[in-house]
């Protein structure tokens, strides 16, 4: 069975991330699932788990799992509410919600 990202989710993430890599602010063209695609629930392809990355940062995330997890770029498969896990981005610390919006956090990372 294909594991295709629905166009609506893809569009919401592209708009939210302004076609930029959330890590380096370069051109973001690869969808990264912060939580494993093997987890099949309402958040599998939800905007709260999707972020745009450039190829270099996408490779970095998968090669540096512990640091990427610390930055919120990887979320535990056991996290049932991935929208509550903040992401450290080039814009600062953000929460990504299921509707494709982001919220800036004031806390230090």
Image (cartoon, helix red, strand yellow):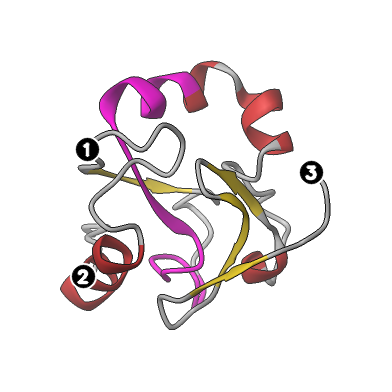
Question: Dot 2: within a 10 Å radius of its alpha carbon, few (fewer than 14), some, or many (20 or more) residues?
Answer: some
| Residue depth check, mark 2 versus mark 1: number of the one nearer the observer | 1
- The residue singled out by tag 3 in the image is 109
Q: Name the residue under label 2.
A: 11
Decide: is 45 above or below 57. Answer: below
Q: Residue at x 41, y 31 (%)?
A: 24
- Label 1 close to label 3 by CB (< 8 Å): no
Disc nearer the start of the sequence (3/2): 2
Q: How far apart are marks 2 and 1 (CA)?
A: 15 Å
Secondary element under disc 1, as helix, strand or loop, is: loop
Provide the residue designation for mark 1: 27
Depth-wise, is mark 3 or mark 2 nearer the camera? 3
Residue found 44% across the figure and 52% down from its top: 37
Q: What stretch is highlighted in magenta?
A: 41-60
Q: Where is residue 15 in the image (x, y as percent from the top left)?
A: 26, 67
Disc 2 vs disc 1: Cβ atoms closer than 8 Å? no
Q: Nearer the viewer, residue 18 or 78?
A: 18
Say whether disc 1 or disc 3 marks the residue closer to the N-terminus: 1
């Amino acid at each position: 069975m294909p594991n295709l990202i629905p166009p609506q989710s893809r569009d919401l993430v592209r708009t939210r991330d302004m076609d930029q890599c959330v890590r380096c602010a370069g051109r973001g063209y690869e969808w990264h699932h912060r939580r494993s695609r093997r987890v099949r629930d309402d958040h599998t392809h939800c905007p709260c788990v999707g972020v745009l990355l450039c190829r270099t940062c996408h490779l970095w995330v998968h090669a540096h799992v512990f640091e990427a997890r610390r930055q919120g770029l990887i979320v535990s498969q056991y996290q049932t509410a991935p929208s509550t896990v903040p992401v450290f981005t080039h814009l600062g610390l953000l929460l990504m919600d299921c509707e494709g919006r982001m919220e800036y956090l004031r806390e230090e990372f």
